[in-house]
Image (cartoon, helix red, strand yellow):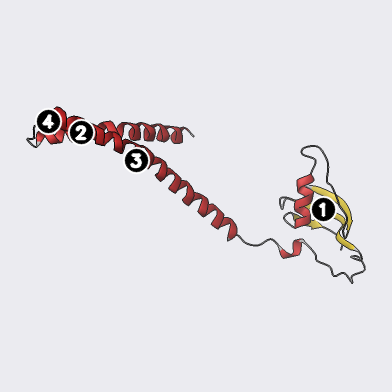
Amino acid sequence: MRKSAYLRAFSVFFWTATPLLVSATSFVVFSLLGHNLTAEIAFTSLSLFNILRFPLTIAPRVVQSVVESKVSVERVQKYLLAEELDKTAVTRGESSDYHMHDTDILVKDGTFSWTEETGHYSLRNINIKIKKGSLVAVVGPVGSGKSTLLYSLLGELIKVRSYL
């Protein structure tokens, strides 16, 4: 974070000072080449440099946005190209199955975990039967496992044990 703050401060200073440096350098080079620097030339040049100040100020922001976009695209690409979930995490039963009669979601004595550590389970002995067309709400305080339950139903947790 400190490196990033120093780099950002240097970048802001550099790009803020650039128009002044460009003006001063231009006048010095113009004089060194043997030309006479008059008030007419100086004020006309300063007007031009002030017109160019906005594009010179915006240039670093454009570069920063391009870099951020590239990083974002790489992250989205990595996510979209990631391996699919474990196909065995969710068992899909047919409606003719005797367990699934009139039921969309059924979990019997389910145990689920975020990690493969033995003995460290996120959900234990979960029993859920949700009938087709029913409205279900998962309610509870923060940290009680609502999201973990939904992730387990989606097959994103490791299924340690489930009968069905």
User: Which secondary structure, mark 2?
Assistant: helix
Foreground of the two, 7 or 46: 46
The residue that appears at 89% across and 53% down in the rendered structure is 127
Q: Quadrant of the C terminus?
A: bottom right
Which tag, 1 or 2, sits closer to the chain's start? 2
Front-most of residues 58 and 71? 58
Percent x, y of residue 11: 37, 35
Local secondary structure at mark 1: strand
Residue placed at 83% from the left, 40% from the top?
140
Between circles 3 and 2, the one closer to the viewer is 2
Closer-to-camera residue (34/71): 34
Question: How much space separates mark 2 and mark 4, taking CA atoms?
Answer: 11 Å
Which residue is the site of mark 2? 44
As helix, strand or loop, the secondary structure at mark 4 comes to loop
The residues tagged by marks 1 and 3 sit, at their Cα atoms, a distance apart of 60 Å
Q: Which sits in the foreground, 134 or 42?
A: 42
User: Which residue type carries mark 3?
Assistant: Pro
Query: Height in image: 47 above or below 136?
Result: above
Three-letter amino acid code at disc 1? Thr
Q: Which residue is mark 1?
A: 111
Q: Which residue appears at 91% of the width and 64% of the height?
A: 102
- Local crowd size for mark 1, using a 10 Å CA cut-off: few (<14), some (14–19), many (≥20): many
What amino acid type is highlighted by mark number 4? Leu
Residue appearing at x 54%, y 57% in the figure: 77
How far across and how far down the image is residue 154, in percent? 75, 56
Looking at the image, is 24 positioned above or below residue 164?
A: above
Dividing the picture into quarters, in which one does residue 40 lie? top left
